[in-house]
Amino acid sequence: MSESDVRVAVTEGERDDAFAVRKAVFVDEQGVDEELEWDEHDDPDAEAVHFVAYRDGDPVGAARLREYEPGVGKVERVAVLDSARGEGWGRRLMDALETEARERGFDSLLLHGQTTAEGFYHGLDYETTSDEFDEAGIPHVEMRKSL
């Protein structure tokens, strides 16, 4: 592995790095209550797959994938540090996540995207499938993509 890549977080250290990015983006930057940010899918024995992006050895991005229902994966907690935005890390995270989703047999993905990121997901061929709704005090829309 290079010092700059996206990988499945398999070690405790990699998971901690992913969680540190999520805390920086969602809790510290966006003001999400920590009680809402962490859930049962973050437990070490949970079925969720965590991803972490590294730039020059430092964690800059994170994402999570879990089964939503048979054949459908749910994309969650996609985050890139402010200092690394605009460098393609979000796309690289999503490419790695979608590859893993296909390998796990998912035929489609669902996500709740912040409305400010809706254009980013449209650029990755996700379609908006709901009206705007509130999640953790932030406007979101549901989006889906066939794999």
Image (cartoon, rainbow, N blue to C red):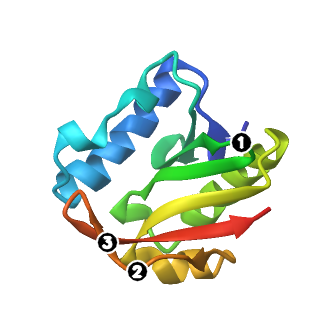
Number of other residues with Cα within 10 Å of mark 1, as a class: few under 14, some 14 to 19, many 20 or more = few
In-image side of 116 versus 57 (left or right): left
Q: Is residue 139 visible?
A: yes
Report which residue position mark 3 lands on: 133
- Residue under the image location 28 percent in, 49 percent down: 24
Number of other residues with Cα within 10 Å of mark 3, as a class: few under 14, some 14 to 19, many 20 or more = some
Question: Contact, CB < 8 Å: mark 2 with mark 3?
Answer: yes
Q: Secondary structure at mark 1?
A: loop
Question: Contact, CB < 8 Å: mark 1 with mark 2?
Answer: no
In-image side of 126 versus 132 (left or right): right
Report which residue position mark 2 lands on: 131
Mark nearer the N terminus (3 vs 1): 1
Residue 51: give x, y in percent of width and height: 57, 41
Label 3, label 1: how far apart the Cα atoms are: 25 Å
Question: Contact, CB < 8 Å: mark 3 with mark 1?
Answer: no
61 over 118 or under it: above or below: above
Report which residue position mark 1 lands on: 70
125 over 109 or under it: above or below: below
In-image side of 67 versus 104 (left or right): left
Residue 127: give x, y in percent of width and height: 61, 78
Label 1, label 2: how far apart the Cα atoms are: 24 Å
Q: Is residue 88 visible?
A: no
Q: Secondary structure at mark 2?
A: loop
Residue 28: give x, y in percent of width and height: 19, 51
